[in-house]
Each structure stands twice: as C-alpha cells, then as structure tokens.
Image (cartoon, rainbow, N blue to C red):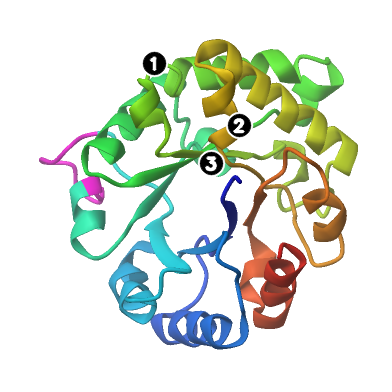
Amino acid sequence: MRKKYIAANWKMHTTLGEANVLASNIIKKSKPNTNQHIIFFPPFPYIQSIADLVSGNESYSVGAQDCASEPKGAFTGEVAAFMIRSVGGKWVIIGHSERRSHFNESNETLKKKVELTLDENLSVMFCCGETIEQREKSIQNQIVETQLEASIFHLNPAAFKNIVIAYEPVWAIGTGKTASPEQAQEMHHYIRQLIAIKYNDRLADEISILYGGSVTSTNASSLFSQPDIDGALVGSASLMTDEFISIIHVGL
C-alpha cells in the first residue's frame, strides 16, 4: 500500500511563535494512521524548532520549502541541503510553481537541487504542473512529462524511491480554483504511467503522487477518493489548525 502524505507548505507566513503554536496544535489534535505521514514545511528559520516538536513521533516530519542549487560556497542568502539536514530537516520541496515562475528556476537547476538533496539523504517532494495557457492549448501532458524527464527521470530506481511527486496545476494555486477530481486523477494516472514506462510497474505503484492545487476540507474527500491521488501538498489551508486537521482526517 502506498504511503499517504499530507504536507503543510507555510510559504512566507507566520512568526516563530505562531509556527510553534500551529504545529503543536496540529500534532496534539490530529490522529494520522500508520500509513499516513504529515510533513511541515515552515520558513527556513523555523525548521529546527519544528523539528524539535516532531522529534520521536514517526507520524510527522519537517522539511524546507527549497534549497540552493550549489553544495556550499559564496552564495549570500542561499541555504544548502546539508544545512537543512543539520537542523533536523528530512525533506525539501523542489520545483514549486512559485519558484519556477517568480525565480525563473529551470528544469536543469531543479535537477541539480534534486541531486544535492538526495546526496544529503533527504527526501524530495518534486512539484510539476502546467499553467492555464498550457492547459488551454491541451499541452499539459507534454509540459509535465518534460519537467519529469529533465529533472528526476535520470535517477536510478533506488534514488527515485526517495521522491514524492506533487502535481500542482499552476492555474489552481492561490486562485481559489481547483482541478476537478477527474482532471486531477487524469494527470496523476498519466504521471504514474510515465514512471512505469521509464522504470517499471512495481516502482510506479510504489511512488506517492500528491495533489497540490488549493486543497481544502471541502474538496479533499472527492480528491482523495481518486485511485492515483495519495494525499496533498496544502498551502493556505495548512495555516488554519482546524481546517488542516480536517484535511488530515479526510485522508484517513
């Protein structure tokens, strides 16, 4: 049975105190089952504090929202993968649509980040997805395939097992829109088919694929009922304790 993940991407929100309260309340009130894992992605300065809160609890872990594309050096303002690991991070989000669009991150840059993250024995949550213009041209499959081929499909099977894929239709992030369950399932199934072709059916069946487009407690049930959707990368709803807990419990 594939692992189910519910991930909280807090983006550039919360103070340290607010982040600690939010994580503490979620841990206290949520009851994930043994096949469900909750990941907090706080801002960089809060990783160690949240890591301390989840320490010893196998149902939760913490990660970074990004990492540098270089291992170390004179790159003022950047945060390297080894630094994330040193403060208790277990995951890194790579390829989020906001990084691709706002910071012009290329597929080649993301490939470097993936490799550096895996080299530090961290797991990768790799994001892929199309813009509204690309979907209107019906080229969403080609776009997603290119993103996967260029950044993660060079990995050997053993390394690829440390990847969780998050499909995020860019047109449904922060807009209040969401892909229909059928649209989401169609892309998730397509991604799983690509993995099967590139690797094998067994690996394709093992890899968790999450949906990441304006997930709420209202639409979570219909999304999670789809056979190829294994959880969610949650944005704004993860900043609200009760709302995020509701999404966790829908996924049980």
What amino acid type should be assigned to the residue bearing mark 1? His
Q: In this view, does 13 lie above or below 99?
A: below
Q: Position of residue 144 (x, y in %)?
A: 63, 22
Residue at mark 2: 205
Instruction: Judge the density around disc 2: few (<14), some (14-19), many (≥20) Cα neighbours within 10 Å.
Output: some
For marks 2 and 3, give the CA distance.
23 Å
Instruction: Judge the density around disc 3: few (<14), some (14-19), many (≥20) Cα neighbours within 10 Å.
Output: many
Residue at mark 1: 154
Q: Is residue 47 above or below residue 75?
A: below
Is 72 a magenta residue? yes
Q: Which of marks 1 and 2 is nearer the N terminus?
A: 1
Residue at mark 3: 96
Is 171 a magenta residue? no
Can residue 143 be seen here? The reply is yes
What kind of element bears circle 2?
helix
Choose mark 3 or mark 1, whichever is in front.
1
Can residue 80 be seen here? The reply is no
**Which quadrant holds residue 141?**
top right
> Are discs 3 and 1 less than 8 Å apart at CB?
no
What amino acid type should be assigned to the residue bearing mark 3? His
What kind of element bears circle 3?
loop
Q: Give the range drawn in magenta.
A: 70-81
Q: Which of marks 2 and 3 is nearer the N terminus?
A: 3
For the point 50% across and 16% down, the residue is: 199
For the point 44% across and 84% down, the residue is: 20
What kind of element bears circle 1?
loop
Q: Position of residue 87 (x, y in %)?
A: 22, 65
For marks 3 and 1, give the CA distance.
19 Å
Horizontal side of residue 231 vs 216, given as left or right: left
In the image shown, does 132 or 37 lie closer to the viewer? Answer: 37
In the image shown, does 34 or 188 lie closer to the viewer? Answer: 34
